[in-house]
Image: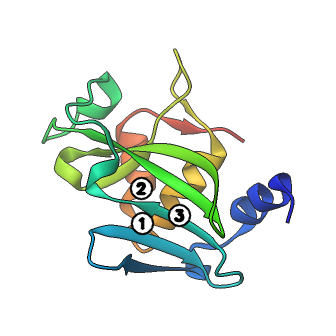
Amino acid sequence: MKFNELIQTIHDSLPKHWQKSYSGLSDNEVFFYTQDVNLRIETSSEDIVVKNFQEEWANKHADSSASSYSYKIYYGNTLIKSVVLVTVDGGRAILPIPKIKSNVVNSFDYKIAQIIEPFDHSLDEYIKLSDLVVEK
């Protein structure tokens, strides 16, 4: 599968087509695409990017603590792309980072956040509370 096809497959996928599992003895979370199990997203506690993430949109909640984590997208053994998401409000939600000097969130990053928290309706709530908007 070509790179652009993989990205489009993820973008067009529904959160219900992804399943969460854990990898081996580690704390790796793995989200695999049920339509093609070679496609997966992985993260672990070791993938923390910034422990005390500081941005106004991320720290404006009741619990101001926020941390960012890298979510790695693989096809087979090949790393395709990494996306950084931020846990906000003490871990109550996982949000994509807006583009530099804006409040606009990339739609692909938003899709990854939807996959990570497919049954958590707080994603859109927290995007609004954080004064973020998803690009069209």
* Residue 121 vs residue 109, the one in the foreground: 109
Q: Residue furthest top?
A: 101
Q: Amino acid at mark 2?
A: Leu
What residue is shown at x 53% (from left), y 64% (from top)? Answer: 41
Q: How far is disc 3 from disc 2 in space, using C-alphas? A: 18 Å
On screen, residue 132 versus residue 9, left or right, reads left
On screen, residue 117 versus residue 111, left or right, reads left
Residue underneath mark 3: 41
What residue is shown at x 28% (from left), y 51% (from top)? Answer: 46
Q: Nearer the viewer, mark 2 or mark 1?
A: 1
Image coordinates of residue 63 in percent, x first then y, are 13, 41
Quadrant in the rendering for residue 58:
top left
Disc 2 is placed on an element classified as helix
* Residue 70 vs residue 64, the one in the foreground: 70
Could you tell me how many numbered marks the image carries? 3
Residue underneath mark 2: 123
Q: Quadrant of the C terminus?
A: top right
Q: Earlier in the sequence, mark 3 or mark 1?
A: 3
Q: Is residue 95 above or below residue 27?
A: above
Residue underneath mark 1: 117
Q: How far is disc 3 from disc 1 in space, using C-alphas? A: 12 Å
* Residue 56 vs residue 49, the one in the foreground: 49
Image coordinates of residue 72 in percent, x first then y, are 52, 54
Q: Earlier in the sequence, mark 2 or mark 1?
A: 1
Whether the residues at callouts 2 and 1 have beta carbons within 8 Å, the answer is yes
Q: How far is disc 2 from disc 1 in space, using C-alphas? A: 8 Å
Q: Residue furthest left?
A: 63
On screen, residue 12 versus residue 124, left or right, reads right
Q: Amino acid at mark 1?
A: Glu
Q: Which mark is residue 126?
A: none
Q: Is residue 6 above or below residue 14?
A: above
Q: Nearer the viewer, mark 3 or mark 2?
A: 3
